[in-house]
């Protein structure tokens, strides 16, 4: 658990928030909204859906702080679990409806030259498309492991599965992503340095 500048833990901040301390809730939001939003964005592929999921997670925490049990998981893990649930609902609908041509591109870090920037944009788009073709259960573990750098145990807590099941899903997700990216490399739509 992180401490705010006054030394309060997430649990203490949540209790203070429940007692009406708005600043405590703002601190909780400041600590955790980035990870929740990134996870939701990568799961849904939509900035709007990610904002909705993030908003819903924090509103749910504000309205029902007793739903969080600090003995079971950290607040960050709990919020990622809530984001997972909401993202899966959103992603499963979108996954069936989404056309690959309409997928948003990831925003890459600035590159030194326009050509390198263009190539990086294209690589990010192709990876994003390939990631969004994965089944939501595979996509979520891959995002949590590779983008959020969570341990297998923490991922298991977030997704509500055994560590062994997470390992299997992660292995399958990496394999399917590799196959999809290899197809792009063979077709020439993905160029690696």
Image (cartoon, rainbow, N blue to C red):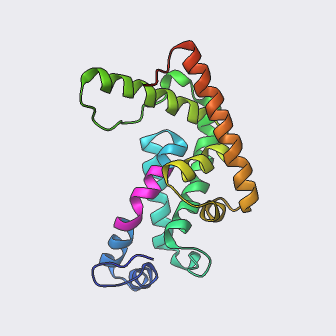
Judge by depth and name the residue closer to the eye, 134 or 123: 123
Q: Position of residue 112 (x, y in %)?
A: 24, 30
Judge by depth and name the residue closer to the eye, 136 or 50: 136
Q: Which residues are magenta?
A: 30-39
**Quadrant of the snapshot with the N terminus:** bottom left
Judge by depth and name the residue closer to the eye, 96 or 35: 35
Q: Quadrant of residue 134?
A: top right
Examine the rendered structure and indicate whether residue 68 appears above or below residue 47.
below
Does the segment drawn in magenta span residue 37? yes
Q: Is residue 92 left or right of residue 28?
A: right
Does the segment drawn in magenta span residue 87? no
Q: Image point 46% across, 24% down: which residue?
A: 192
**Quadrant of the snapshot with the C terminus:** top left
* Residue at the top extreme, as displayed: 187
Q: Image point 39% across, 57% down: which residue?
A: 34
Q: Position of residue 48 (x, y in %)?
A: 43, 43
């Amino acid at each position: 658990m992180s401490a705010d500048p006054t030394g309060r833990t997430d649990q203490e901040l949540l209790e203070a928030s429940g007692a009406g301390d708005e600043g405590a809730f703002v601190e909780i939001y400041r600590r955790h909204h980035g990870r929740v939003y990134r996870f939701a964005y990568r799961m849904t592929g939509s900035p709007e859906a990610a904002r909705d999921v993030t908003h819903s997670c924090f509103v749910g925490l504000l309205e029902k702080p007793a739903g969080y049990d600090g003995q079971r998981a950290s607040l960050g893990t709990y919020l990622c679990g809530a984001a997972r649930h909401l993202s899966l609902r959103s992603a499963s609908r979108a996954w069936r409806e989404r056309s690959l041509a309409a997928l948003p591109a990831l925003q890459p870090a600035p590159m030194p030259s326009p050509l390198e920037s263009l190539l990086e944009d294209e690589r990010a788009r192709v990876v994003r498309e390939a990631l969004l073709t994965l089944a939501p259960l595979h996509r979520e573990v891959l995002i949590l492991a590779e983008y959020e750098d969570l341990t297998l145990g923490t991922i298991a807590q977030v997704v509500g599965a055994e560590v062994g099941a997470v390992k299997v899903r992660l292995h399958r997700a990496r394999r399917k992503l590799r196959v999809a990216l290899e197809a792009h490399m063979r077709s020439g739509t993905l160029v690696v340095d």
